[in-house]
Image: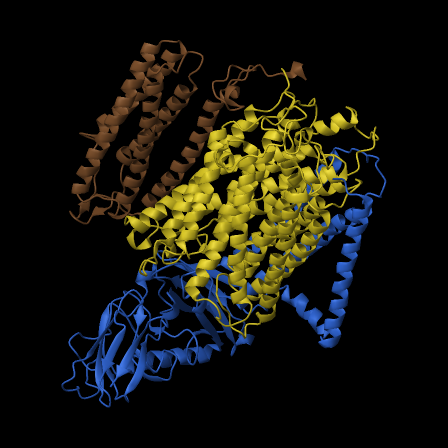
Chain colours: A yellow, B brown, C blue
Amino acid sequence: MATTVLHPAAPAYRSTLYEWVTTTDHKKIGIMYLLNSFLFFFLGGLLALGVRVELAQPGLQFVTDSTYNELFTMHATFMIFLFIIPILAGFGNYIVPLQIGAPDVAFPRINALSLWMLPLAGVLLILSFFTGGSAAAGWTSYAPLSEDRPLAALGPGQDLWIVAVVFIGTSSILGAVNFLVTIFKLRAPGMTLFRMPIMVWTVLVTSVLVLLATPVITSALIMLFIDRNYGGSFFDPANGGDAILYQNIFWFYSHPAVYIMVLPAMGMISEILPVFSRKPLFGYKAFVFATAGIGALGFSVWAHHMFTTGAVYLPFFSLMTFLIAVPTGVKMFNWIFTLWRGKLRLSTPLLFALGFLSMFLIGGINGAISAAVPVDFALHDTYWVVSHLHYVLFGGSVFGVMAGLYYWFPKMTGRMLNESLGKIQFVLMFIGFNLTFFPMHQLGLSGMPRRIADYASTAGWNELNLAATIGGFLIATSMIPLLWNVFLSLRSGKPAGDDPWEGNTLEWATSSPPPPYNFDHLPEIRSERPVFDARYGPRSHGATATAAPAEH
Amino acid sequence: MASDSRALTTSTEQSPVGGLSHDARGGISNVVLGMLLFLTSEVMFFGGLFAAYFNVRANSPLWPTINPETNQQFHLDILPLVGPATVLLILSSFTCQMAVWGIRRGDRTAFLRNIAVTFAIGVIFLLMQATDYVALGSEGMTLSAGTFGTTYFTLTGFHGAHVFGGAIMLGVVLYRGLAGQFSARHHDAVEAVSLYWHFVDIVWILLFSLLYLLPGKGGP
Amino acid sequence: MASSPRTGRSSAAIGALVVGALLVLGVVVVVVGKVDVGGAGEQIVSSLYPPPAVTDRAVHIRDLYNTVFAIAVVIFFVVEGLIVWTVLRYRRKPGDDELPAQTHGNAVAEVVWTVVPTIIVAFMFVISWQTLNSVEAISAEPQTKVAAVAGQFQWQFAYLDPNVTPAKCEDIKPTYTQFTPTGEGGGLYVPAGRTVQLFLCSPDVIHAFYVPQFLFKRDVVPGRMNTFEFTIDEADAGSTFRGQCAELCGAGHRVMLFDVHAVSGSDFDAWLQKQIAAASASPPPAPSGEPASSGGPQPSGQPPVQGEPPLQISAFNIAFEQTALQAPAEKPFKIDFDNKDSGTPHNVAIHEGSPTGAEVFKGEIFPGPAKKTYDVPALKAGSYAFVCTVHPTMTGTLTVQ
């Protein structure tokens, strides 16, 4: 097959805005996923600051109870549906075709459709603030509260919310179909399933979860919409419906959703740890099975969100929840033993990856404590759960996203991000994060419920809430070096070259950024580290470097 | 790496992956695989609705529930509309499959004729369903008529929406077929749409059995 | 890019700087703030545990927590220690470009760290299941039965005949209903040392009954009657425990507080008898068309007012249907109050100036659908607010002139 080589004198080509808006190129689409997601990260973060500002001291100082309910509802909605799930899809979009040696995803036009549904849904949600109040029944939107009965209807905000989330779900499902066909059908010759990078495996399992779970929440929300607007009685106990039914259908999706929110981040960590330890991932096959196991088990635990409803067969869900700790632990040890006896380069991607390991460990542990049902009777719906979910989603997924950003920014833009600014961001974010969310363990244990705009000044929660608010602002501050770093590096960052990190996987075998069709030629694929093999020769087991890697 | 080349079939699209839906190494076409995966997600969507139906039914001491307008139980009639519509829909799956077999062996006439019939039956099904809805409405059965009405219209309504989508797809396939865009070698869209149509039919058979054939409970 | 020797050193420098700064800051705070480090340390450790348990079942839950938490702490220190040690020990030395041994895995290690965690979680599951069985146990003869009714946005407690077990919320026939959940004379009174069975009912949305010192909560689901039992330690008689709704139920979620007053068995019996007697002896309002729903006797309390038609106030959907009313100054007047909310208690109370001003009149609280007429004593001219005592969000203005 003929290869195409750009003429050396060809000028650098900058795409026009029109090309960005109409593109079907997975790389541009991936970058736009990232941009849209970061926008909603910041909006969701502002809403979080609103929550923390009100809670910093006892007394209702800044917002009404109704507005407060809107704040935390939309904070979670933005973060879950418009930030973390899409940004991981965005990284998948950019990286997966490159890592499997494909020129694009299987259905590029559907890819573009999936992307553009997101800002559209985001606009609907932002508009809902101005239509008499956004949704305010929590992101979980439990019926009958979300059915506005018996109180008079609270306005169309909840309906806009339903429409937007169904839209986002559809975008996700189409994306999942795309990823699965791409991974199954477009791998380069030589790349068997068990030579795929772990990032690709996690995107595969995540896509299966999206495919099977997301339609279920679509059905729940449609039924909710019918109840709200057409006099339906699915979830209305006054008319023969069942409030618990909503929870069962909702959590059947929303539990696998949390794995959708973390598995690709784990995939990214699994790319970064080997590169920065200069060793392969420890226990690759076990890792694949553990990922698949988490995906499968993830469908069997949904009712652990409903332990206090009195409508759940408790021992089964408790057992399955405890069992999920096992494959998660396998992964944790695989990661640690990738580092073990490696030669660690403590660059920013690795720092964020290490942060992920430590914070996800805490999140996993406090989750396992909640799996003990009687303990959950005490801790459910308190700030303990807020702490748990943020340790896994922020300490886990967001730190993973930051690691991925620093790792792949050079590939996407051709420029390195500044290391010193990256480290400053890491330190600020790490300290701020723990200052915000660790005290919530104590708050929850002592009895502070979730979703309250204010608390009694005699309850003993004042200092911890103030500390959490300070931490929140510290997290916000950590965004400044990030933004500055991106801005600076785009303009005058150090040119990255093809392979600035000495990577293992195929994306590092092409230019930064890659040409539209991704590869001029592919190295031979004989293991999960084709670029490593090409650099060090086929027998890289215990080999010394045949040539010193280029110093950057 | 020239020896590792993928033998590409000729691409009719400009996209770099347009020609990749048929790998020289064989296997399922991308379009068909994509449709199968999409149908899996549709199964889960209807699964959620079915789960709600079973739950609501199990919690109700009486099923069908009482119609407040007549003070008697609601009832669903298989004749004169729904039963024949079901038979027609099943028939349309046969004609759809015959269309696929037709184009696979290059018989454009058989393909076009059968697709046209399938499309027509789809439209007739929708008209019959709509007529039945109006009749039910006049008897006091609506979305807001308690759990019985809500579940009935939600389940059949979303099925009908899927039939509508399927009819549009059949129409597009018919149009493209008339324009000569399909051949024995290239007819992925036909295969994919036929899979969708069979899925819609199977869901209807399930729905019909559950809503019309399953005995009620708690009544006289 | 590969981290250059310079960046490697600078990252260590930054780390050291931060740690050092934090240590200095900590010392300064302790010294200047005269922080009692020992006491603070104790406080920090105890804050990682739930509050002291006051019921028999809470003790079991607390014991379970202690075990599970101890395991968690050990696991954390082992794994986190491993991470920290690995990072410190295996940092790349500047200039070292040799590849480390390319170990792909180790079957023994992988089996060990699959099997051992499985055993640990299996153990944790078994002990938590055992604790669950003791917590969920329903005794044959609970001595006290109370229905906790959670509405938007107030708790009420309906005391039931201990010999009758309701099958569903609609069957509940209270001997006495405690309408106010907090404050003077309000709250859930329970006998310490006796088994109390609680039935949870909601007429509207999902709430949750949560008492942190019970280490327990249970959802209150409309259309469903959850039930659980507890026995407060006799030693805790005389204590009050705070409780709060723990499931988002709307704009008033955070004000749904309640107190649990544990009193000795004999005190409880006396209190309940007194409440039942007071409720049936309280004078009903003067007759005015509709008979009172309680069906009590109908003597006239005050002479009917001549001339002025009664003020019409009605409540529907947890709101007054009137926002601004007028009343004559210096003259007693009547209020015809129509409570349209089925099963929901309301009243009309009048406060000076604003809803939080001094209370000058409080009408009887009763559940709908029912009507009652209140006789309001003469008020001075001025502006007042009328409020529902049960639902503080229900307010309106009353101009007296």
Could you say where residue C31 lies in the image, as x and y percent from the top left? Answer: 75, 75
- B75 or A484: nearer the viewer: A484
In the image, taking residue A247 as reference, residue C93 lies left or right, namely right
In the image, taking residue B71 as reference, residue C165 lies left or right, namely right
Q: Which image quadrant: the C terminus of chain A?
A: top right
- Does residue C290 lie above or below A433 as drawn? below
Q: Residue A519, located in which quarter of the rendered image?
A: top right
Q: At x 76% / y 40%, what residue is drawn?
A: C2
Q: Residue C366, located in which quarter of the rendered image?
A: bottom left
- Does residue A479 lie above or below C394 as drawn? above
Whether residue A200 is visible here, answered yes or no, is yes
Could you say where residue C115 lies in the image, as x and y percent from the top left? Answer: 68, 41
Whether residue C247 is visible here, answered yes or no, is no
- Does residue A208 lie above or below C379 as drawn? above
Q: Residue B32, located in which quarter of the rendered image?
A: top left
- B113 or C59: nearer the viewer: B113
